[in-house]
Amino acid sequence: MNQVSQPMKRSGPLVIAALALLLLILHQDYWLWNNKTLVLGILPIGLFWHICISLAATFLWYVATQIAWPLRDDGRTNEAKASAQEDRG
């Protein structure tokens, strides 16, 4: 389920870094400073924007842990399993 293709593993950290930089740029919402629009009649548009940025950052960090730092990435686990099977039989 956590299997990611090899090309994605190599370019994954670069994609994550680019998306993090994009979120950093989008976080600077100078275009909404003077906007008086309310979302759902109660939430200022600037606050709504920051909620969306926070949710996007949460998703980005989840994806980063899956792509850039997968749990079963190193070959030592496979080597340990192979040596354990050799010891048993």
Image (cartoon, grey):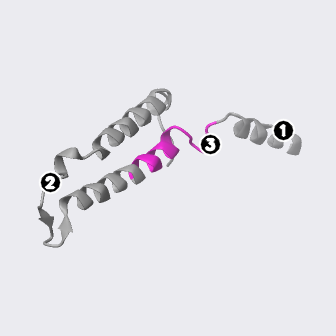
Mark 2 in CB contact with mark 3 (< 8 angstroms): no
**What label sits on residue 34 in the rendered view?**
2
- The residue under label 3 is 72
Q: Nearer the viewer, mark 2 or mark 1?
A: 2
In magenta, the rendered stretch is 59-73
Is residue 36 rendered to the left or right of residue 13? Answer: left
Q: Which residue is mark 1?
A: 86
Using the numbered discs, state the Cα–Cα distance from disc 1 to disc 3 in whole angstroms: 21 Å
SS class, disc 2: loop
Inspect the magenta stretch and tell me whether residue 60 lies in it: yes
Instruction: Left or right? Give the position of 13 relative to 78.
Output: left
- Secondary structure under the numbered disc 3 in the rendered image: loop
Furthest residue toward front = 34
Q: Quadrant of the C terminus?
A: top right
> How far apart in space, not on screen, are marks 2 and 3 (Cα)?
48 Å
Which tag is nearer the camera, tag 2 or tag 3?
Answer: 2
Q: Are marks 2 and 1 in contact (CB under 8 Å)?
A: no
Counting residues from the start of the chain, the first of labels 2 and 1 encountered is 2
Say if residue 50 shows up in the picture. yes
Q: Is residue 31 above or below residue 21?
A: below
Image location of residue 85, percent across then percent down: 80, 42
Secondary structure at numbered mark 1: helix
| Residue nearer the viewer, 20 or 64 | 20
Q: Is residue 16 left or right of residue 52?
A: right
Instruction: Please report whichever mark, 1 or 3, sits nearer to the chain's N-terminal start.
Output: 3
CA separation, marks 2 and 1?
69 Å
| Label 2 vs 3, first from the N-terminus | 2
Kindly identify the residue that appears in the image at 49 percent across and 27 percent down.
10
Q: As shown in the figure, which amino acid type bears the numbered disc 2?
A: Asn
**Quarter where residue 74 is shown:** top right
